[in-house]
Amino acid sequence: MSWVPKLDWVFMTFVVMLSLAMLVTGFLIPSHPIFLFIGVFELLLWLFIAPGLANAFLTMVQLTPLGGIIDYFPLTSAFFMNLPLVGLIVGAIASIFTYGKTPNPYGGH
């Protein structure tokens, strides 16, 4: 089963690429500063939802037959254990990229 550890890297590559895509689109799409308040609300909502998801993941891998499999996926396990922090960091950086750009002279922000 030499291909199993590669799935861990595939998952992390997928997460990193989606995060980078979110940052790039946040920078390229025109936005109005009023949506910053909506973004802050979403980050606060994420801080309430993400710990439950992390605890559900921990419960799933400890109480089910999947418990032994998690040893093969250290990156995925670390990602889910730090899910609130990762989401907060990516969301804050996305907000900076989205609302910290200079105004467009042709309209939009």
Image (cartoon, rainbow, N blue to C red):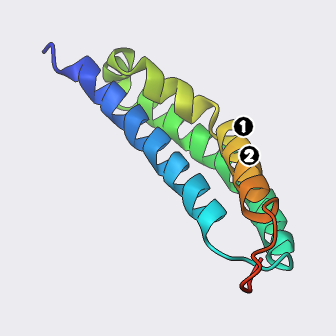
Quick one: SS at disc 1?
helix
Q: In the rendered structure, which amino acid carries the disc numbered 2?
A: Leu
Instruction: Decide if residue 38 is on the left or right side of residue 85.
Output: right
Q: Could you tell me if the residues under marks 1 and 2 are in contact, i.e. CB atoms within 8 Å?
A: yes
Q: Amino acid at mark 1?
A: Leu
Of residues 66 and 93, the one drawn nearer to the viewer in this rendering:
93
Residue 27 percent across, percent down from the top left? 65, 61
- Please state the total of marks drawn on the protein image: 2
Which residue is drawn at the image coordinates 37% and 32% (left, top)? 64
- Residue at 74% across / 46% down in the picture? 88
Q: Residue furthest front?
A: 105
Vertical placement of 37 versus 74: above or below? below
Q: Check disc 2: other Cα within 10 Å, few if <14, some if 14-19, many if 20+.
A: some
> Against 52, is 80 above or below?
above
C-alpha gap between disc 1 and disc 2 = 5 Å
Residue denoted by label 1 = 85
Q: Please name the residue shown 21% across and 21% down the image.
A: 4
Report the quarter where the N terminus lies. top left
The x, y position of residue 54, in whole percent, is 59, 39
Can residue 104 be seen here? The reply is yes
Q: Label 2: which residue?
A: 88
Q: Is residue 20 above or below residue 82?
A: below
| Pick the front one: 49 or 11 | 11
The picture places residue 98, in percent across and down from the top left corner, at: 72, 63
Res. 47 visible in picture = no
